[in-house]
Image: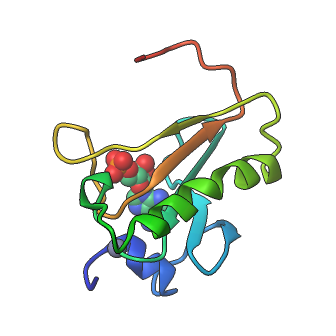
Amino acid sequence: MENCIFCKIINGELPSATVYEDENTLAFRDINPAAPIHVLVIPKQHIISLDDINTENKKTAANCLAAIPEIAKNLGLVGGYRVITNIGKDGGQVVPHLHFHLLGGKKFKEKIV
Ligand code: AMP
Ligand code: ZN
């Protein structure tokens, strides 16, 4: 997608601090971290959000999600971590390319659920 900043990161048009990459998934540090460790895990295929999962792309999304435990382990998050995905306007999504926020490096006290 032409104007998608995460697609530009995937294509190398924008820089990122990459922490993990395979043929399906890219993970890089969030530019504005909300925790000591804050990584965005994204599919290389442009999918807008979980709302846009369909029979063709659901394997891509599932592979992306399945990479998270290995990424967390590589980052040393042995005590646990949190994964968040925002969907659409009411969900607070700003970048319209599916991403999982992987947050850790501290014990979270605040909880939404
Ligand atoms: P969301 O609000 O769920 O759409 O999250 C978008 C996230 O992308 C925010 O946490 C931003 O800090 C992050 N972000 C935006 N641009 C970049 C970038 N160029 N590199 C890394 N993270 C970014
Ligand atoms: Zn994109």
Residue 15 in the image, given as x and y percentages of width and height: 54, 77
Rendered view: 51 above or below 113: below
Identify the residue shown where x is 72% and y is 54%: 71
Left/right of residue 107 with respect to residue 95 in the rendered view = right
Give the farthest residue toward the left.
Answer: 89
Rendered-image quadrant of the N terminus? bottom left
Q: How is the image coloured?
A: rainbow
Identify the residue shown where x is 28% and y is 47%: 93
Residue 20 in the image, given as x and y percentages of width and height: 69, 67
Rendered view: 104 above or below 32: above
Identify the residue shown where x is 69% and y is 26%: 106
Rendered-image quadrant of the C terminus? top left
Give the farthest residue toward the front.
Answer: 55
Residue 11 in the image, given as x and y percentages of width and height: 48, 87
- Given residues 40 and 62, the one toward you in this image is 62
- Given residues 49 and 40, the one toward you in this image is 49
Please count the marks in the image: 0
Identify the residue shown where x is 58% and y is 12%: 109
Left/right of residue 12 with respect to residue 92 in the rendered view = right
Left/right of residue 26 with respect to residue 97 in the rendered view = right
- Given residues 64 and 7, the one toward you in this image is 64
Residue 21 in the image, given as x and y percentages of width and height: 66, 73
Which image quarter has ligand 1?
bottom left
Rendered view: 91 above or below 80: below
Left/right of residue 94 with respect to residue 12 in the rendered view = left
Rendered view: 24 above or below 94: below
